[in-house]
Every structure is written in C-alpha cells, then in structure tokens.
C-alpha cells in the first residue's frame, strides 16, 4: 500500500520561509504526479501546485510567485514557501496520483503551517 507523509510544517513569522517535504513509501518506485494542497480553517481545500515526474507543473495562479514545487526523486515532492503571510496559515496536504498504478490517488495526513508574529 502506498502512503505519503508530509513534514516541515510549523510556526513562522510573517515574511518568513518554510520548506515542506513529502515522501512516498510502499511498493511503487515512481509516482506520476505529486502535489500540494492546503485547507485553511473554515475554508475548502485548495490546490497549490502539482508536478509530474516529467516536470510538468500546475500552479494556482495566486501562489505561483511565492511558492515553488519541486521533485528530487520519483517518490517525493517539496514545497518552498517564501514571504509567508498570516493568510497562508493552513494544514498543508500532499497528494500522490498515478493512473497507471492501480488508479493511485492518496493523501497524506497533513502538516500544519501557522504564520504569526
């Protein structure tokens, strides 16, 4: 069974930076698309960015100038977040998708990011 686990969340001051990591595990050596989503209190979960193993990215337009997604292995994904604002406070989720691997679509448990002074 494939699982993904996020790490790197925490408390950061406005204007600061954080790097989130997501590692996949299980009987898979390549996850076609991995991405980041977030859910703020009282709001719906929203897309931040996804990236395929081929390097194709899809960003939410409003976050592209501050957030950068990257993949350094076929089963991991990272999110570099800069100039963080209080409205970025949310639970950040990793998602792994691979239609060619048993229709894989799994989510992590989330990592909390709090932006506050």
Image (cartoon, rainbow, N blue to C red):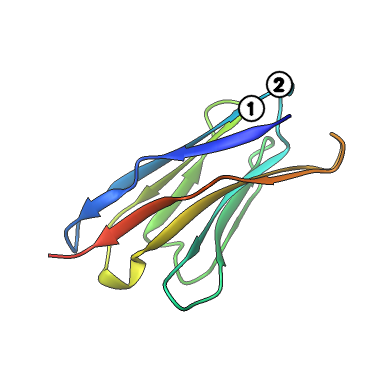
Residue 99 in view (yes/no): yes
Instruction: Kindly check if marks 2 and 1 are in contact, taking CB atoms under 8 A apart as contact.
Output: yes
From the viewer's perspective, is 40 left or right of 29?
left
The C terminus sits in image quarter: bottom left
- Quadrant placement of the N terminus: top right
Q: Decide: is 70 above or below 89.
A: above
Q: Is the residue marked by circle 1 packed among few (<14), some (14-19), or many (20+) residues within 10 Å?
A: some
* Residue 116 spot, x, y in % from top left: 19, 65
In the current view of this chain or complex, which residue is farthest to the left? 117
Q: Is residue 71 left or right of residue 54?
A: left
How far across and how far down the image is residue 7, in percent? 40, 38
Answer with mark 2 or mark 1, whichever residue precedes in sequence: 2
Residue under label 1, please give it: 74
- Of badges 2 and 1, nearer the viewer stands 2
Instruction: Look at the picture and state if 64 lies above or below 7.
Output: below
Say which residue appears at 22% left-offset and 53% top-offset: 11
Q: Residues within 10 Å of mark 2 (few under 14, many from 20)?
A: few
58 vs 21, nearest the viewer: 21
- Residue behind mark 2: 29
- Residue 9, position in %: x, y? 34, 47
Question: Which residue is painted at 32% across and 73% down in the image?
Answer: 87
Helix, strand or loop for disc 2: loop
């Amino acid at each position: 069974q494939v699982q993904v686990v996020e790490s790197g969340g925490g408390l950061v001051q406005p204007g600061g930076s954080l790097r989130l990591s997501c590692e996949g595990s299980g009987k898979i050596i390549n996850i076609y698309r991995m991405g980041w989503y977030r859910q703020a209190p009282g709001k719906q979960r929203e897309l931040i960015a996804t990236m395929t193993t081929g390097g194709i990215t899809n960003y939410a337009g409003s976050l592209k100038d501050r957030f950068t997604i990257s993949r350094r292995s076929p089963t991991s994904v990272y999110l570099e977040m800069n100039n963080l604002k209080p409205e970025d406070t949310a639970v950040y989720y990793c998602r792994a998708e691979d239609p060619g691997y048993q229709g894989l679509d799994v989510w992590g448990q989330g990592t909390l990011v709090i932006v506050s002074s």
